[in-house]
Amino acid sequence: MYKDNFTHRQIMTDHLYEYHHYRNDTPPEIDFHQHEFYEIYLFISGSVNYIIEGRTYKLQPGDILLTNNSDIHRPEILPSDQPYERSIIWLDEDFFRGMRLIGEDLTACFKDAARRNYRLIRPTKSQLAQIQKLCEILEFERASNQIGNRVMAYSAIATILVLLSRAYYDTPDSAQKDITESDLVNQIITYINEHLAEDLTLDDLADHFYVSKYHLSHQFKQFTGLSLYQYIMKKRLTIARNMLMTGTPVTTVYTKCGFNDYSNFLKAFKREFGMNPSDYTKKSK
């Protein structure tokens, strides 16, 4: 089976989709990040706690995670006698537009996972076997020069999405035992996402949730892996990037994302994404 050489690249270089199959004998260190695309992550082996938006998922082989273009996430890869192996599919928004032409919105499970803040799919053995077989087809067609190989790969991904959509709603309640979370942190994250344009200071949030600043800071860092400031800044920049992708003027973007000063927004955006907002807008077009 084909294996990719792992890199820390988090930007798509192909149009519509990318498929990667990675295997690392030495656990790599991966920072918190976010994408401008959807991601399907199929865990094969190793020992991983995956942190997404304040929840930590203790993964079992065969588990699948769904992340969208605003989720801040990071795998915590632990030492294991098994290699860290996974398959990853990246999907651009344009991929789903083709599906919508025939009346299917296969982003529904991604959106519902974000709404519920619950990204885990634990498929049955039968569902997993079908998905793994389709991944093998993807790998074969990607390396093939035969006529129609792109169509076959596209078809395999579309079928995977259908199976995932069905498996998502069938995931057993017993999977909850492998999730570590805090009700307080979940509420804070929801509040932040709903009030990004407003001042979100530690003092204000502590007063709103009737907790001490120390307790809030400690709990937030414990469950998200980021300080409150780091999370708010990453979230604001991520939403700003997504708004720029849809053509929203930069003057609207930075105020709606809670940046009261354009120069500060410019510096923070360039630090996070490696280019200024106007260059990013041109790239998106």
Image (spheres, rainbow, N blue to C red):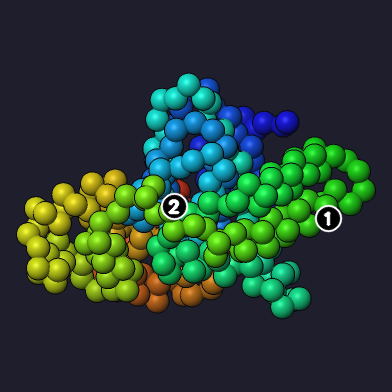
Q: How far apart are marks 1 and 2 (CA)?
A: 35 Å
Which element is circle 2 on?
Answer: helix
- Closer to viewer: mark 1 or mark 2: 2
Farthest-out residue, right: 147
Residue ID for mark 1? 151
- Quadrant in the picture for the N terminus: top right
Q: x and y percent of residue 34 in the render? A: 45, 52
Q: Is residue 30 visible?
A: no
Q: Which residue lies at the image location 48% right of the left edge and 75% below the top edge?
A: 248
Q: x and y percent of residue 172 in the render? A: 49, 57
Nearest the viewer among 219 and 202 is 219
Sort mark 1 into few (<14), some (14-19) or many (20+) by Cα contacts within 10 Å: few
Q: Count up the numbered dots.
A: 2
Q: Which residue lies at the image location 27% right of the left edge and 70% below the top edge?
A: 191
Q: Is residue 192 left or right of residue 127?
A: left
Which label sits on residue 6?
Answer: none
Q: Which residue lies at the image location 74% right of the left edge and 76% below the top edge?
A: 101
Sort mark 2 into few (<14), some (14-19) or many (20+) by Cα contacts within 10 Å: some
* Residue type at the position of mark 1: Val
Nearest the viewer among 95 and 185 is 185
- Quadrant in the picture for the C terminus: bottom right
Q: x and y percent of residue 120 in the render? A: 48, 54
Q: x and y percent of residue 142 in the render? A: 78, 42
* Residue type at the position of mark 2: Ala
Q: Can residue 49 be seen in this view?
A: yes
Q: In this view, does 182 lie above or below 80?
A: below
Which element is circle 1 on?
Answer: helix
Which label sits on residue 175?
Answer: 2
Q: Which residue lies at the image location 32% right of the left edge and 74% below the top edge?
A: 194
